[in-house]
Image (cartoon, helix red, strand yellow):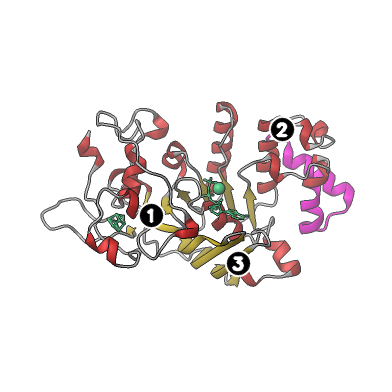
Amino acid sequence: MADTPETSTPDTGAAAAESPRTPILSVRDLRAAYRGGDGMIPAVRGVSFDLYPGEVLALVGESASGKSSVAHATLGLLPSNAEVSGSIMYEGRSLLDLKGDERRQVRGGEIAMIFQDAMAGLTPTLRIGEQVAELFLAHERLDAKAARAAAIEALRPLLPDAERIVDAYPFQLSGGMAQRVMVAMATALRPKIVIADEPTANLDPAVRLETLTWLEELRDRGTAVLLITHDFGVVARLADRVLVMYGGVVAEEADVFTIFRRPRHPYTYGLLSSLPSVMSGARLTPMRGNPPDLATLGEECAFLERCPKAISQCRTLPSPPLVAPEATPGSDVPVAPGHRVACFNPMVVDLRETR
Ligand SMILES: Nc1ncnc2c1ncn2[C@@H]1O[C@H](COP(=O)(O)OP(=O)(O)OP(=O)(O)O)[C@@H](O)[C@H]1O
Ligand code: SF4
Ligand SMILES: [Mg+2]
């Protein structure tokens, strides 16, 4: 690894996992399915994880693995054709059961979201100032004049000409400016959790770097960040822990160092094997096949059709549970605390040694 500072192995040691701290968000057996013309599409099929104050938990995986569905379910933003079950506990409150004022207070105030498409996250018919001021009207009960002043102050660190921007409509902004507005809105009320869904996708390098720096500052102030990304450079730079999702389930969970250096799930290994920054000096191997069709997935491991490590059990038993991998006899590859993998035949690799 170590081609560029951003994609080098995060050299933190097997740190954060198995923390004695209390999680700020606990998700258990989350399931979300969308009703479609051909029946239900089970996008999230029993996802569990904890998020701790001041940590960045990255959610990675190919397109359609269910990452945004987890994020939207957490904030109660799933569309009306979705059915959701399981438990999402935030500071002792069940987010799936929140209603009315309490729900509004939590959503946007205590838990904020940076959407995958910044422009789509803004209301096209409202001026930027109105949209930002609405946060202060709703959550801090300021009057209109004070809310507008607060909106300008919230925008100013990211957009120095905030006085002008507040009177603009979203279509008058560039993609980078819309992204900055979105970040300002997400952080205006000092939320305890920020869910950032592909916050750096489609951004030019300067805005991308700015956004990463903002996320780092948030984390350093104690905000917990659930970071959804395809970009392993961003994972290496920001994440403390990583959940790898595949076909609506968590395939692997570990601290970021372990994921990059000692992945156990063949899917995680497959993702890393196509990254020059991880496999420098070794042969790059693009992963074969495509993500599964969720509508027709059976009980077996979702990765079966693409897996180079499949054994007979994988074809005959239901999908394996997410558990700590066993130490491998004769191998000196250690098992990190908090490492969990859903696989009958996990890999035993040390990527530092493959280079
Ligand atoms: N509103 C919806 N109605 C029907 N199906 C949906 C809806 N939203 C998502 N899906 C389906 O749910 C599955 C998971 O989608 P989701 O957006 O959560 O994936 P993702 O991991 O965020 O993907 P990406 O990386 O492309 O953003 C996909 O098969 C998608 O087509
Ligand atoms: S359970 Fe079997 S098919 Fe699934 S990832 Fe592991 S080895 Fe591959
Ligand atoms: Mg998504």
Spot occupied by residue 91 in the image (x, y as percentages of width and height)? 57, 68
**What residue range appears in magenta?**
132-158
Q: Which mark is residue 77?
A: none
Graded by Cα atoms within 10 Å as few (under 14), some (14 to 19) or many (20 or more), the crowding at tag 2 reads: some
* Image-quadrant location for residue 80: bottom right
| Quarter that holds the N terminus | top left
Give SS at disc 1.
Answer: loop
Residue depicted at x 66% and y 37%: 179
Mark 1 vs mark 3: in front: 3
Ligand 3 lies under 8 Å from the Cβ of mark 2: no
Q: Which mark is residue 159?
A: 2
Q: Closest to the observer: 233 or 64?
A: 64
Give SS at disc 2.
Answer: loop
* Of the image marks 1 and 2, the number of the one nearer the N terminus: 1
Residue identifier under label 1: 16
Residue depicted at x 88% and y 53%: 143
Spot occupied by residue 251 in the image (x, y as percentages of width and height)? 38, 56
Name the main secondary structure of what is drawn in magenta: helix
Q: Closest to the observer: 277 or 310?
A: 310
Residue depicted at x 58% and y 33%: 202
* Of the image marks 3 and 2, the number of the one nearer the N terminus: 3
Spot occupied by residue 236 in the image (x, y as percentages of width and height)? 41, 40
Residue identifier under label 3: 83
Residue type at mark 2 is Leu
In which quadrant of this rendering is ligand 2 seen? Answer: bottom left
Give SS at disc 3.
Answer: strand
